[in-house]
Image (tube, rainbow, N blue to C red):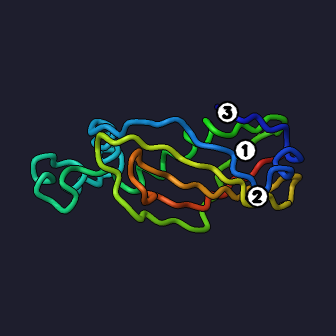
């Protein structure tokens, strides 16, 4: 369920709060192959289904950066900011991929609003602690501190 936040003051009021989780999304081989084509990263652990069966993960796995690239759409399932002129991706403070995402698994993200800091031009920098997890797997698959900027 998407939480709609009203503007910058609404964001500031939620600092330190867990905002919830996205829906679960299946990671398909077709999606992994399309990402490999888009990024020219055709490492066999991602795209060679037969070879990967005998590899360290027992099958193909998603690229770490594929998981990260899903952040904007998955976070939008949790958090929608209204009452701003625009929002832009600004970058990352921290990023780790502690566990693989097996093809065929389901992935979601948990969102915690870590900080909202004023920046020039009538905007704020929002820091989100995003924890990506695979259904049924205890260890997170991606932990990222994602930065966005919103301008009123």
Q: Secondary structure at mark 1?
A: strand
Residue labelled with disc 3: 2
From this viewpoint, is residue 112 visible? yes
The answer to whether residue 141 of the structure is visible from this angle is: no
For mark 3, give the secondary structure: loop
Residue 79 % position (x, y): 69, 40
- The residue identified by callout 2 is 16
In the image, 86 versus 26, the foreground residue is: 26
Where is residue 40? Give x, y as percent.
Answer: 30, 52
Q: Is residue 65 left or right of residue 126?
A: left
Q: Quadrant of residue 114?
A: bottom right
How far separated are the C-alphas under marks 2 and 1?
Answer: 20 Å
Along the polypeptide, which appears first: circle 2 or circle 1?
2
The disc label shown at residue 139, or none: none
Question: 117 or 98: nearer the eye?
Answer: 98
Nearer the N terminus, badge 3 or badge 2? Answer: 3
x, y (%) of residue 147? 66, 58
Considering only vertical position in the picture, is 138 above or below 103?
Answer: below
Contact (CB < 8 A) between labels 3 and 2? no
């Amino acid at each position: 369920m998407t939480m709609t936040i009203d503007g910058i003051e609404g964001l500031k009021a939620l600092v330190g709060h867990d905002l919830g989780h996205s829906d679960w999304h299946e990671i398909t081989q077709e999606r992994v192959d399309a990402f490999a084509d888009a990024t020219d990263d055709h490492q066999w652990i991602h795209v060679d289904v037969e070879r990967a069966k005998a590899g360290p993960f027992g099958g193909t796995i998603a690229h770490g950066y594929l998981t990260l690239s899903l952040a904007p759409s998955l976070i939008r399932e949790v958090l929608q900011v209204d009452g701003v002129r625009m929002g832009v991706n600004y970058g990352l403070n921290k990023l780790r991929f502690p566990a693989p995402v097996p093809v065929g698994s389901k992935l979601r993200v948990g969102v915690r609003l870590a900080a909202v800091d004023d920046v020039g031009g009538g905007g704020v920098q929002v820091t989100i602690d995003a924890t990506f997890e695979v259904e049924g797997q205890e260890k997170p698959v991606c932990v990222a501190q994602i930065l966005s900027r919103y301008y009123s």
